[in-house]
Image (cartoon, grey):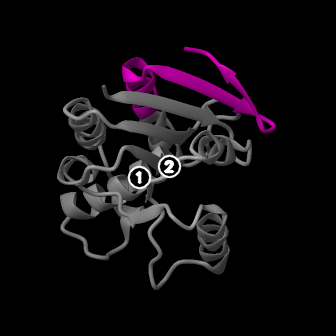
Amino acid sequence: MAKLTLITGGAKSGKSEVAEDMYANEHGVCYIATSVIRANQDSEMKLKIKKHRQRRPADWTTEERYKDVSIFVLMNDYQKYLLDDATMMTTNLFFDLVAKMYNDFPGNVDEDIEQMNKDEIESIQTTILQEFSKVVDSLQRTDQEMTIVTNEVGLGLVPASKESRILRDTYGLVNQLLAKKADDVYFVISGLSQKIK
C-alpha cells in the first residue's frame, strides 16, 4: 500500500538528515535529488550537493531530476523514494515556466518576473501544483513509499522582492497540498522531529 510522508522544517533544521535516518537501514531506496548540478552553478551549491551525496548509503540509487517525477515513479519499482526537496523542485519548475512563458531561454528571468501579472503568476502556480499532484497520484497507483522533504516558509519577514514573495507563496501552496495528501507529517526543529499528522 502506498504511503506518503512529508518532512518540513526551516533551512538547516536537520530535516534532510531526519528523512535519511528514517531509511537508514533500508535497501533499494531511490533518492530523488531535485538540486541538479548545472555548469553555471555557484561553488557553495555544488559543495552542498557533494555533501548530500557523500551522506547517502552506497547501495541507494540517486536520480537527479525535478521534471517528470511522476513518470519516473510509474516507470520504476523502487520500494522507497526520498525526494529532497520539494522547495528546490518548485524553484526549478518556476524558473523553467517563467522562461517558457516569455520564450526567454536562457534570457533574463529576473526582468520577466518583474513584469508578471496576477493571472500569469496564478497560471504558473497552478501548473506547479499539478506537477506535485501528479507525483502523489502516481505514488498512489503503486505499493511504494515516498518521503518528501520541504522547507517550511512564511515564519520570517515578508520578502522584499517580488520574485521572493511569489516563490514564498508558491512554496506555501505546495507545502499545503503535500501536507493534506500525506499520511504522516513531521516538523523538524534543531534536528528534532515532531509528528504533527
Q: Where is residue 175 in the image (x, y as percent from the top left)?
A: 46, 30
In the rendered view, does 27 fall on the left or right side of 24? Answer: left
The numbered mark at residue 103 is none
Residue topped by disc 1: 89
Residue topped by disc 2: 85
| Amino acid under disc 1 | Met
In the rendered view, does 104 fall on the left or right side of 113? Answer: left
Quarter that holds the N terminus = top left
Q: Give the structural element (helix, strand or loop) at label 1.
A: helix
Q: Residue at x 27, y 40 (%)?
A: 135
Most extreme residue toward the right, as rendered? 190
| Residue 121 shows up from this direction | yes
Q: Give the structural element (helix, strand or loop) at label 2.
A: loop
Q: Position of residue 70 (x, y in %)?
A: 23, 46
| Residue 153 shows up from this direction | no
Q: Residue at x 28, y 33 (%)?
A: 143
Q: Does the magenta portion include 49?
A: no
| Amino acid under disc 2 | Asp
**Quarter location, residue 34:** bottom left
Range of magenta residues: 174-197
Quarter that holds the C terminus = top right
Q: Position of residue 148 (x, y in %)?
A: 47, 40
Q: How many labels were placed on the picture?
A: 2
